[in-house]
Image (cartoon, rainbow, N blue to C red):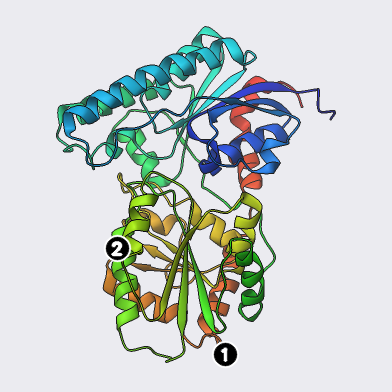
Amino acid sequence: MPAQQHRYRATVLVLGDLGRSPRMLNHALALAEDGAAVSLAGYHETPVDGSVLNHPRIRIYRIRSLRRAPEGTPRFWFLLVTALRSACLFFESLWVLLLRTPRPDAVLVQNPPTIPTLLAAWIAARMRRSLFIVDWHNFGYSMLSPRLDPAHFVVQLAKSWEGWLGRKADAHFCVSQAMRQILVDNFGLVAPIVLYDKPRELLPLLPVHERSALARNVLSRAGLTLPCGTALAVCPTSWSADEDMDLLLEGLERWDSQAPSSPLLRLMVLITGRGPLRLEFEQRLSQLSWRRVLPHTAFFDPADYRELLRAAHIGFSLHRSSSGVDLPMKIMDLFGARTPASVLDYGPCLAEQIQSGQTALTFRDSHEFAQRIDELLQGFPDDPQVLERMQRNIEASFPETWLQAWQRDAAPVFQLVSGPA
């Protein structure tokens, strides 16, 4: 099908950094491959994957990123800054959706953020007679809880607002069965579709003993060196409040101070990404001195990031869900690279995607985290039987890409507006 032709038009709205919204980029790619002309609107602070940026059917529309209230801001100023920021983003989002983008047949919006995203998308969809679709990653009201008490009237008002706007949508996607149950029971939504995160691509399994060489090659581009005999752990993070970086430091401190199973074993921990809490974390990190842990922060472009995940011996996920029912998307990137992980266990919904002991090891506190590092690296580097077994388990458990799952579970929704193929 020539690039200028399309079966339908879709607008994908992300009131967030496009470079840090892999699920919505995956949606845009899947829609484009399905023959849609895609308008992708959002912040453009970090590099967008080249497969999205250069796709002939995807056009990106920039929305300005306005500063959030800093961490530690008094509650009154937090609410005031948030309200002013939301009002500005509401009008800019409407301007983009109504005046800059071609009239879409469907508007797909990421939630959260809820305010003002859902309202802007709903108004635009109704004014342009488009299908209004919400992809639920989490709940906006639950993400207010770290800053405000869950019983605070603003949180309760946000919950009611989120449910009311959610019921205006024509279709819904969500990330877990547990989330679907809440959407049905608490919000009264009809038939939300569970669209699990999947790896965008399935990289060939790279054996453990070959990963160090690739790691040195990738790390050299960031000015880093992996010492001989050192295991590489990657901790993908967006540097936001829903990731427990305190627990990461506590667990690494405990592992560093305990008697080593192998006196020569050391661990380089590369914490990747950009986000609001990175600078504060780096300041804390500079004051630490460990014997066996070599911590670093770095940012990689999408292509190097995929190579890094494939080169890593293990991965860490410190995602702590504010709702308890969303799933850590970055784990899918690790699984796509066939890289075993140690994952913070914050609720039963993890079992929907992670087989504890088979594809990943879970932990609940710093003591268990240190234990999981030892278990994963047992026999490393000479006889890494645990890592090799888990790599094979991951390969067997995740044979499907995002696009394959999208075509099965999501494409039928867009066929309502696409007409005959």
- Residue at numbered disc 2: 247
Q: Quadrant of residue 75?
A: top left
The x, y position of residue 183, in whole percent, is 35, 34
Of all residues, the one furthest to the right in this rendering is 2
Question: Pointer 1: residues within 10 angstroms few (<14), some, or many (20+)?
Answer: few
Q: Quadrant of residue 290?
A: bottom left
Residue drawn where x is 62% and y is 32% of the image? 412
The x, y position of residue 328, in whole percent, is 44, 52
Question: Looking at the image, is mark 2 or mark 1 earlier in the sequence?
Answer: 2
Alpha-carbon span between mark 2 and mark 1: 30 Å
Residue drawn where x is 30% and y is 39% of the image? 143
The x, y position of residue 51, in whole percent, is 70, 42
Q: Quadrant of the C terminus?
A: top right
Check residue 382 in the rendering and tell me which mark sits there, or answer none.
1
The kind of residue on which mark 1 rests is: Asp
Residue drawn where x is 33% and y is 33% of the image? 140
Q: Is residue 324 above or below residue 173?
A: below
Residue drawn where x is 38% and y is 75% of the image? 372
Q: Secondary structure at mark 2?
A: helix
